[in-house]
Image (cartoon, rainbow, N blue to C red):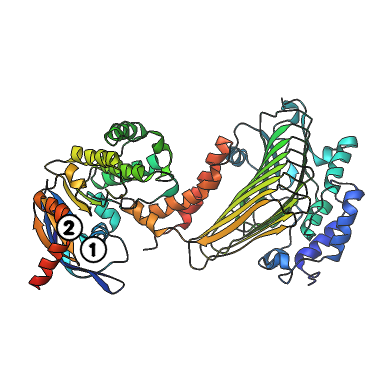
Amino acid sequence: MIQSTSIFSEWINQQIDSDSSFAFSETVRSPSLSKLAKGVFPTRKDEEWKYTPLNDLLTLRPVNYDLGEMDEESIQYLKQAMPESHTIVFVNGEYSDAFSDSPSAIEDQGLSITPLPELEGAALELAEETILNSTLTDDNIFQHIALGLTQNGLFIEVDKNIECQTPIHVLYVSTAHGMTGFTSPVNVIRVAGNSHLKVVEQYASIGEAAVITIPASYVHVEDGANLDYYKISLENAGTNHVCNTIVKVARTGSFKSHQYLLGSNLTRSNLEISFSGPSAEAVLRGVYLGDENQHLDVRTYLDHAHPHCSSDQHFRGILNGHSRGVFNGLVLVREHAQKTDAQQANKNLLLSRDARVDTKPQLEIFADDVKCAHGATVGELDSDALFYLQSRGIDKKEATLMLTRAFAAEVTQEIDIDSLQAYVQEKISASLDEIVIPSV
Amino acid sequence: MLSIKNLQVSVEEKPILKGLNLEVKPGEIHAIMGPNGSGKSTLAHVLSGREGYQVDSGSASYKGLNLLEMAPEIRAREGMFLAFQYPIEIPGVNNTSFLKKALNEIRKHRGEEELDAIDFLSLIKKQMKLVEMKEELLKRPVNQGFSGGEKKRNEILQMAVLNPTLAILDETDSGLDIDALRIVAGGVNKLRSSDNSFVVITHYQRLLDYIVPDFVHVLSNGQIIKSGTKELALELEERGYDWLLEEAESKV
């Protein structure tokens, strides 16, 4: 069980001992550091990690020196997903003054965006309190890496009764030119009562080298507030991306999450949501797209502890080559959570014989007056639909592409930022163009 | 146009078509009638290139080309069209962009310029009037959530837009009420010309009240057992199929 001797965990221990400037105070860091000191990484004997090996990640040794500059052109290219937004850019984990929109340019009153190192006083306390009030069910080491080692990230805070018009686009870029990079950004988002906010987190890499990205996000949606939270992960094929997102939604609050996991060697996304009051809702959407030996693991946990809350999940996987997908979704409906409405769907499309998916939707219900449903499918393209398209003059490759794009579009069409929807659909199409070969 | 000679086809080793002959010339409408299980839909599927059908012997040529060796999309690009008995729902594929793509593939094949969005839209709007289809159906995914009648109209709309030289209508009348039937048949009649041919596969005579065929063939047990003119269809309507089947058996 204990892999304390892995190259990566040795490196982590060295970081703990180094005198870098970390983002959080000892209150937040101490518990995480003591976990890290033990160096326990999960293995496939752990139920939670049964399908997801960490071998590739644990043999990496990141470097601490300059990983390369970011050029203007690449940034502009990445910004195109969200031309109308407040853009905040991090390059190799560092906040970039040059590429980010200045926080003072933000016109929405009551919205503040602060890089973690600049936090002080009450704001720092609030950010830390938000983290300390969020607990992971799966006490995995990765959130401790993020909390213990992070030097940067963002605190986004919205006051009560604010309708933020402009979405926030947070861009995490790694420049991976021949050396292994490491970033572990922490994002803390608080949306106060009756306010509305949209945040897009985008992860990208320039270059081909392996990168380790271990983000953690802590989100509080307060009474009657709304947060639309998008995550786009499109890092290079050497990347190992393990993220945790912990969300609390208060009375009549609404949290909508979209996750598009389109890159990396290994992606593991753990999303945990708990309702802290009645009549709250969570809507989760996602697409994971894999080729060659990519591994994509999506986990969701929905804790229905209060009555009249609803959750609606819809995740789709497209897997080609030898890629592997894992979906594991647990919905817990506690005894007092009457009138819960919980829906969960996971659909997977296997484009090759060697692709594989393990899907495990789970419901644990302790209340007796609830409406819950879950379902999972794994299949190939519908041969009747393929023939129908061919019979109208469209060749098999193009028909395959159209149907596969359509499979993803049933989720992506729900992205309600037009430029982002177009961007994600185009990225999915571009990936499919590369991987779909006519199976004649 | 279409020449089928002694076509023998089996599905999972079971013979379905047992020596079928059919000649269709430009401008002709042929009706193929027959009881359930006679091989009508198999004929439609084999002609359109669907997988799962084993051609054991015989030939089918279309415009002088060996039809049986052509991929389904090539048949379509060469001007063949199958109106499906059960049109397929394709979630996530927009009806308009699907049809535009199909038309442009066919135009490319013919060496014609592709239509841009504006030209295509004006074409499709014109053809929609032909089948009295609601415009909102264009914005929906292909056939998804369409009623039975709307699906069949969508087939005829596709046919009108793609303008085939040979159209095969596979039980297009099944599941249609009389109004829908009239609209669908009206669409077909407006597309009739001296260059275009139709093979209308149907179980019932009533479609032939609206689409008047030049020839009527009766398919039974994988063979055409009788051919005639439109009067044959009326006779079938009156007397059913049994007398013909008996007549055919007594000949054997």
Could you tell which of marks 2 and 1 lies nearer the N-terminus?
Answer: 1
Q: Residue at x 19, y 50 (%)?
A: B205
- Is B220 drawn above or below residue B90 in the view shown? below
Which residue was labeled with disc 2?
Answer: B240
Residues under numbered marks 2 and 1 in contact, where contact means CB atoms less than 8 Å apart: no
- Is B170 drawn above or below residue A100 in the view shown? below
Identify the image quadrant of residue A17. Answer: bottom right
Disc 2 sits on a residue from what chain? B
- Residue B39, numbered circle: 1
Type of the residue with mark 2:
Gly
Q: Residue at x 28, y 35 (%)?
A: B127
Who is closer to the viewer here, B202 or A126?
B202
Q: Which of label 2 and label 1 is nearer to you? A: 2
Who is closer to the viewer here, B206 or A363?
B206
Task: Locate residue B49, reporting x and y percent.
Answer: 27, 59
Task: Locate residue A301, reporting x and y percent.
Answer: 71, 54
The kind of secondary structure element at disc 2 is: loop
- Residue B85, numbered circle: none
Q: Both on one chain, marks 2 and 1?
A: yes
Q: Residues within 10 Å of mark 2 (few under 14, many from 20)?
A: some
Task: Locate residue A21, reporting x and y percent.
Answer: 86, 47
Task: Locate residue A350, reporting x and y percent.
Answer: 50, 61
The kind of secondary structure element at disc 1 is: loop
| Left or right placement of residue B179 versus residue A73 in this view | left
Q: Residue at x 62, y 53 (%)?
A: A344
Identify the image quadrant of residue A417. Answer: top right
